[in-house]
Image (tube, rainbow, N blue to C red):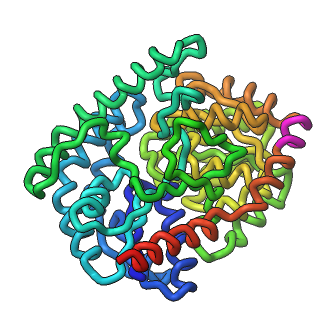
């Protein structure tokens, strides 16, 4: 089979696809990753073919816009950024999918993949990394900006809430999408957030103990567990390992690989470590957001593979991205989540419910709030709960089950045709 893996976003969005690629290659399949241009070298190092879905310049333009992390402005900003790219991405994916025995595995945000599925009748699986994007009346996810469905809402009002979300999706993306659909000879669609998932197969790359399946989730959704891949085959560097083992385990601070606007966060992180006499490790690709002078107990690194790093650390403070969340759960590392937008509030709420961490509002991330939360986080009770959950997370590798489902979808399509 020719498996086309396609996604947009930053490390947490791309790493599961980088992990799937080698697993599928071992089974004898040809793999093409269609993803943002900055991931080309990693994909090719892992033996995959690569096509640029988004240029490095466009990625930079997206990440430099602070609205990306605003709970209310992020949606309109991303729609304005991404809608003009749909025709180009459709042409690229249609060209790839026209090859014999092709199958698409796509991030739902790659709207062009669904168009190719409809237009060329190419088999496709949606790869869903987080439960927070699944509309549900029985167990509503936590929403950005505090726009959660109140527990006391009756079902008719809950359904009306999701209708309003659908209306927003149709307004932001649906109108532009339907203009292009008309050019392709396709009928217009409504309720964009229901349409964007493949009707054939949705692979939920999270376990049922993290998010229990709900009766109003899509029936084609199957959970496989977290994907265990940190983006690189190289082990943790000796420098980082030696620092972690040179004293009390450090606290990791990160707001994700795409965050370019974190100067205040890292300044407060350094102050919080000083107030509680903790060692700290600051992770960001953007050295300009790190304070000019760091004490010897604080280090900055651009990147570290979490699954090797976090077992050496006493806690992690992060934004609530699903990749970071999953790695910390597996490592048994207590988490302090400061959600900004997207699925991050929902991941934070699930971490708190599991008893392996806590959440503070992004407006309350000053050093005194960080210090207080970190003291509460590193209790023996939390640490014990983290180890219990860690044993659950280590028992399942979502990549292996996802590969089997992808093969089953492709083989079934070949048999039918």
- Is 372 situated above or below 40? above
Residue for point 69% across, 33% down: 272
Query: Is residue 384 found inside the magenta-colored segment of the image?
Result: yes
The answer to whether residue 194 is left or right of residue 129 is: left
Residue for point 36% across, 81% down: 101
For the residue pair 192 and 36, the one nearer the viewer reads as 192
For the residue pair 140 and 157, the one nearer the viewer reads as 157
Residue for point 72% across, 45% down: 209
For the residue pair 379 and 251, the one nearer the viewer reads as 379
In the picture, the quarter occupied by the N terminus is bottom left
Residue lying at the far front in this picture: please name it.
Answer: 416
Query: Is residue 218 found inside the magenta-colored segment of the image?
Result: no
Residue range highlighted in magenta:
380-385
User: Whole-percent x and y of residue 164?
Assistant: 34, 23
User: Whole-percent x and y of residue 344?
Assistant: 54, 38
Is residue 152 visible in the rendered structure shown here? yes
- Is 312 situated above or below 138? below
Residue for point 11% across, 46% down: 179
Main SS class of the magenta portion in the image: helix
């Amino acid at each position: 089979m020719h498996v086309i893996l396609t996604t947009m976003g930053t490390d947490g969005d791309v790493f599961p696809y980088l992990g799937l690629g080698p697993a599928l290659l071992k089974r004898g399949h040809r793999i093409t990753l269609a993803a943002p241009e900055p991931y080309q070298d990693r994909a090719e190092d892992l033996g995959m073919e690569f096509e640029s879905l988004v240029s490095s310049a466009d990625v930079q333009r997206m990440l430099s816009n602070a609205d990306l992390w605003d709970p209310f402005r992020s949606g309109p900003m991303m729609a304005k950024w991404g809608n003009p790219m749909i025709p180009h991405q459709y042409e690229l994916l249609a060209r790839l999918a026209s090859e014999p025995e092709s199958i698409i595995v796509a991030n739902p945000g790659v709207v062009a993949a669904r168009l190719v599925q409809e237009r060329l009748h190419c088999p496709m699986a949606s790869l869903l990394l987080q439960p927070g994007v699944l509309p549900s009346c029985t167990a509503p996810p936590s929403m950005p900006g505090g726009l959660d469905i109140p527990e006391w809402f009756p079902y008719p009002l809950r359904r009306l809430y999701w209708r309003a979300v659908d209306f927003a999706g149709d307004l932001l993306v649906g109108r532009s999408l339907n203009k292009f659909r008309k050019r392709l000879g396709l009928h217009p669609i409504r309720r964009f957030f229901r349409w964007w998932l493949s009707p054939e197969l949705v692979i939920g790359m999270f376990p049922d103990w993290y998010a229990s399946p709900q009766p109003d989730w899509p029936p084609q959704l199957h959970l496989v567990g977290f994907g265990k891949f940190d983006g690189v085959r190289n082990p943790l560097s000796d420098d980082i390992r030696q620092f972690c083992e040179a004293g009390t385990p450090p606290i990791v601070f990160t707001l994700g690989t795409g965050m370019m606007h974190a100067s205040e966060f890292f300044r407060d992180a350094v102050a919080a470590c000083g107030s509680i006499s903790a060692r700290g490790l600051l992770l960001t690709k953007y050295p300009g957001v790190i304070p000019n002078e760091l004490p010897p107990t604080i280090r900055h690194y651009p990147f570290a593979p979490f699954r090797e790093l976090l077992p050496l650390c006493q806690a992690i403070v992060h934004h609530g991205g699903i990749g970071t969340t999953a790695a910390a759960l597996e490592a048994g590392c207590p988490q302090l989540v400061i959600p900004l937008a997207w699925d991050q509030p929902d991941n934070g709420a699930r971490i708190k419910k599991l008893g392996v961490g806590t959440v503070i509002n992004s407006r309350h991330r000053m050093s005194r709030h960080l210090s207080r939360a970190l003291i509460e986080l590193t209790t023996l009770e939390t640490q014990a709960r983290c180890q219990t959950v860690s044993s659950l997370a280590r028992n399942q590798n979502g990549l292996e089950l996802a590969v089997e489902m992808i093969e089953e979808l492709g083989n079934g399509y070949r048999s039918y045709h």
